[in-house]
Amino acid sequence: RKLVGKLTTGCEEFDEMMGGGIESQSITEMYGEFGCGKTQVAHQLAVNVQLPPEQGGLGGSVVIIDTENTFRPERITQMVNGLSEKHGVEYDPEEFLKNIHVARAYNSNHQILLVDSASELANELKDSEMPVRLLIVDSLTAHFRAEYIGRGTLADRQQKLNKHLHGIQRFGDLFNSCVVVTNQVMSKPDAFFGDPTKPIGGHILGHTATFRLYIRKSKGDKRIVKLVDSPNLPDGEAIMSITTDGLGD
Ligand code: ATP
Ligand code: MG
């Protein structure tokens, strides 16, 4: 087993709550309502992973499996410019964009297959200057939710989701990579699913995701991130902000 890496979020409280940052070789699940900031955190991590360890990064590149077409290069540019200001260095956004490998997933089967493509790429980059140290699946559950509607198909859905989760866990282990997945939850009950206020895939995800983060909106640009049921860390809450410059305290 390789030494576990810690990836900074850019928010001190958040990092502290996580025992230093997002851990490699583990799945971290971010769940919360639409607009709470899951995709924003994903973008920020895609930037931060490229920083050297002295700056809280893992000196690596990232693969994003984008299932909702929400990756925005312009947002990366804003965040890199935010970092330049924070560190007093002139980072080149284009250099950061080069190390972000985005793959669109058109349906759940395609999404599962893309983990294999991600592994191939990670193998190719293994001994390069920018090995893949972060895999993002945003959203983990949207396609599954859309394709498996109704109670009859629930078992099938869980089985496939479970297989997918094993695949991404393997990726994390194999490449000493962080794995971050997003999962939208609704605040109000919905007719289709048993308890939609719980994340879809709740049970299986509950056991597989090592770190579960519940994100909710607070005042203005503030967000509350809650660490839920971690095996080795106390439950806690952190306040982060999301501004044009990216995530902050
Ligand atoms: P969903 O479940 O629909 O995917 P999400 O949790 O991924 O939602 P995000 O898209 O990450 O939500 O968050 C959107 C919010 O992030 C916006 O409402 C805004 O508050 C903030 N945001 C997005 N872009 C910027 C920006 N350039 N500057 C400041 N804040 C921004
Ligand atoms: Mg999103």
Image: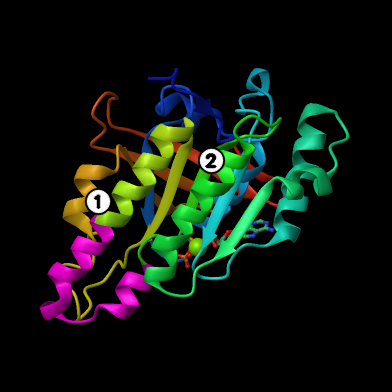
Quarter of the image where ligand 1 sits? bottom right
The location of residue 54, given as percent across then percent down, is 66, 17
Region of the chain picked out in magenta, as a range: 142-162
Q: Nearer the viewer, residue 35 or 46?
A: 46
Q: Residues within 10 Å of mark 2 (few under 14, many from 20)?
A: many
* Image quarter hosting the C terminus: top right
Q: Residue at x 41, y 55 (%)?
A: 182
- Quarter of the rendering containing residue 148: bottom left
Q: Earlier in the sequence, mark 2 or mark 1?
A: 2
Q: Residue at x 64, y 53 (%)?
A: 101
Q: Residue at x 53, y 48 (%)?
A: 120
The location of residue 168, given as percent across then percent down, is 38, 47
Relative to residue 166, is residue 1 drawn left or right? right
Q: Which residue is mark 2?
A: 134
- Asked if residue 248 can be seen in this view, the reply is yes
In the image, residue 123 sits, relative to residue 194, either above or below, namely above
In the image, residue 138 sits, relative to residue 249, either above or below, namely below
Q: Residue 205 shows which numbered tag?
A: 1
